[in-house]
Amino acid sequence: MFQKFKHLFFLSLLLCGKVFSQSVTVSHALGTSAFLKGETFSQALTYAPRLNFLFFGSGHTVSIGTTTSMAIVFASNAFDEPIVTFDVPLTLDLNLGHASDEDSDAGFGGFVGLGPCYNNIWDYSYQQFNYRKLPGTVGLVFNGGIRFDSYVIGSYTLRGSYMLNFQNGGSNVIGLNVLINLGDI
């Protein structure tokens, strides 16, 4: 039994050495987002940094990042009060092609990933002639998208996401982001 753990330990050290011996780059993007959660629609400003830490040749990376969005929602229901909202996923993504790393010269690319997410966009529930606010949600977000170079006015990312709500009484969240790729830091 100890022999198996010893082999597993040395294999993990070898893999960690391979991962961390490579250079690490930080890419980032800025843009806008739209979210639909139950009956609530919101738009937000978005900043999306990611840490590219595993490279499989030019144009293929694994990254960990966030597409953090913040908005002030003006509710169109019984509350009619502005609410500051956040959507904060932390995803592990596989990036291919355009903008996957600083050396990629592809004109088109994409990514897929998943990870935990916190979203506090209020969800309104109508029960017995009365609205009530449902709290923010924590769940698993699935995301994917495309990146492309317009060759005229810059590089863009279109990202879609779907968050499964793990808490009772709330809705799943659908998101769409349009981002301008700012490159590597």
Image (cartoon, rainbow, N blue to C red):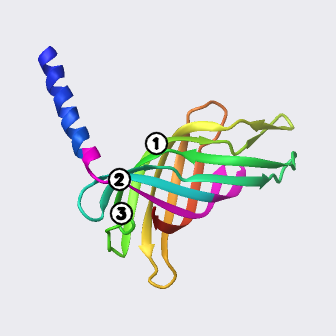
Q: Amino acid under label 2?
A: Val
Which residue is most to the bottom? 152
Which region is colored magenta? 19-45
Q: Amino acid under label 3?
A: Asp
Is 37 magenta? The answer is: yes
Secondary structure of the residue carrying tag 1 is: strand
Is 143 situated above or below 151? above
Residue placed under numbered mark 1 in the picture: 115
**Residue situated in front as seen by the camera: 179 or 170:** 179
For the point 23% across and 61% down, which residue is it?
57
Residue 135 - label: none
- Tag 3 near tag 1, CB within 8 Å: no
Q: Residues within 10 Å of mark 2 (few under 14, many from 20)?
A: some
The nearer-to-camera label among 1 and 2 is 2
Q: Quadrant of residue 125?
A: top right
Secondary structure of the residue carrying tag 2 is: loop
Residue placed under numbered mark 2 in the picture: 24
Secondary structure of the residue carrying tag 3 is: loop
Residue placed under numbered mark 3 in the picture: 101
Residue 9's spot in the image, x, y percent? Answer: 20, 27
Q: Can residue 125 be seen from the camera position used here?
A: yes
